[in-house]
Amino acid sequence: DAKTTQPPSMDCAEGRAANLPCNHSTISGNEYVYWYRQIHSQGPQYIIHGLKNNETNEMASLIITEDRKSSTLILPHATLRDTAVYYCTPNFGNEKLTFGTGTRLTIIP
Amino acid sequence: DAGVIQSPRHEVTEMGQEVTLRCKPISGHNSLFWYRQTMMRGLELLIYFNNNVPIDDSGMPEDRFSAKMPNASFSTLKIQPSEPRDSAVYFCASKVGRGFNQPQHFGDGTRLSIL
């Protein structure tokens, strides 16, 4: 399976936008980029996914570069409840979601 | 709406014992996934089913692990005999259909400790 690269940790001030990058340079044409987060001891929570166009839902926005080799998850107004580990996981041509080590996001009051 | 329901939430047992983990997918979802999460290996896919049929079990670690899906609303993951290295959090997830444009939704997991 191809790999993704995410920064291991990030901090963001409460109320500010949190921008989480992900590099997925080996993604193929029909593979979607999925974002999940995991709050301690809970199951991964689905946030958003996209193929090539930017996407927005009630939780976040997803910006995918034109070459699809990277993406950015944006939490527009971060709250303390957004503190979690965030995973970027393309589905690499099959049903598998390959969760790497993710980015540990800490929201600072 | 009810999400994916897993039971038990916690299980502590001695090595050599049989362990059965249970999962009820979201109603209407016809794909089901079993994952295992450890500090060392992260989140790994063990097996997944579509329409109750196992599609890919390449992640099942060894013959001590088995999974069944007797109907659309129930699945089990069994470990027999259990070993301390099986200690992990086991997650079940479900989704609508097959294909790439549907997200998987996870349960809150079963935390398994083998003594």
Image (cartoon, grey):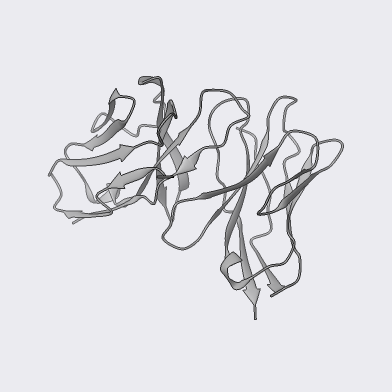
| Image quarter hosting the N terminus of chain B | top left
Q: Residue furthest bottom?
A: A109
From the viewer's perspective, is A70 left or right of B54?
A: right
Residue B16 screen position, x and y as percent: 13, 44
Quick one: B40 or B90, which is closer to the camera? B90
From the viewer's perspective, is B97 left or right of B37?
A: right
Residue at (27, 26) in percent of width and height: B68
Q: Quadrant of residue A99?
A: top right
Quick one: A15 or B111, which is closer to the camera? A15
Disc tally is: 0
Residue A53 screen position, x and y as percent: 81, 37
Quick one: A103 or A40, which is closer to the camera? A40
From the viewer's perspective, is B67 left or right of B56?
A: left
| Image quarter hosting the C terminus of chain B | bottom left
Q: Is A44 rendered above or below residue B97?
A: below
Residue at (46, 63) in percent of width and height: A40
Residue A14 screen position, x and y as percent: 69, 75
Q: Residue furthest front?
A: B1
Quick one: B70 or A6, which is closer to the camera? B70
Q: Residue furthest right?
A: A66
Q: Quadrant of residue A66?
A: top right
Residue A85 screen position, x and y as percent: 57, 59
